[in-house]
Amino acid sequence: MFGAGEEGLNEGVLSAKNMEEFNAVVQQINSINKEITDDLVATTDFFKESMLLFIFDKVRGSGGHTMEVINITHTSEALVVSIKNTAPEGPASTVMTQPFVVLKTAKSSLPIQVKVIGL
């Protein structure tokens, strides 16, 4: 995202377990710049067995930062998502960015924990 944090999305995770939650997150992401295009589409049927996790990095002072999902673990106490953050190698554009990933997983009522590797 390129809104320099104006979207109001803090570092962390938001889950979408139904259409209302999905539409609210997408609207907030798109509030400054249209980031999510028609490629990310969900239906009511999708949310019967699945949910989406939107995992946000902190606002970064340059481009080139990436986030990658390394592992998803379901324990009896939590859904643990391991994320690898990578900084750009060499010169990077001077632009405020906020990397994020969208992840589909089985629907769960467990708390979500994000473990960050790197940076």
Image: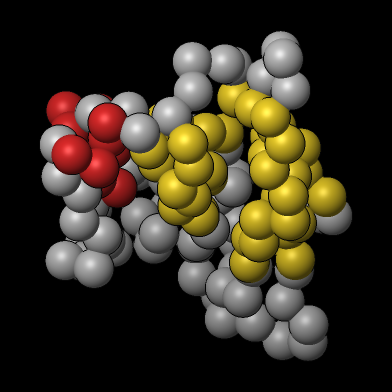
Residues 36 and 79: in front is: 79
Mark yes or no: residue 60 visible. yes
Q: Residue at x 75, y 68 (%)?
A: 87
Foreground pick, 72 / 35 = 72
In the picture shown, does residue 33 fall above or below 6? Answer: below
Q: From the viewer's perspective, is residue 66 above or below residue 88?
A: above
Quadrant where the N terminus sits is: bottom left
Relative to residue 45, is residue 69 drawn left or right?
Answer: right
Q: Quadrant of residue 14?
A: top left
Where does the image place residue 50, in percent across and percent down from the top left?
Answer: 38, 37
Residue sitting at x 64%, y 68%: 65
Drawn side of residue 46 relative to residue 110, left or right: left
Q: Does residue 27 appear in this view?
A: no
Q: Which quadrant, please, contains the C terminus?
A: bottom right
Q: Eyeballing the image, is 70 above or below 81?
A: below
Q: Residue reaching furthest right?
A: 118
Q: Position of residue 66 (x, y in %)?
A: 63, 67
Q: Is residue 95 left or right of residue 68?
A: left
Of residues 85 and 43, the one drawn nearer to the viewer in this rendering: 43
| Circle count | 0
Q: Position of residue 23 (x, y in %)?
A: 17, 38
Q: Residue at x 16, y 66 (%)?
A: 38
Q: Residue at x 48, y 50 (%)?
A: 103
Is 67 above or below relative to 104?
below
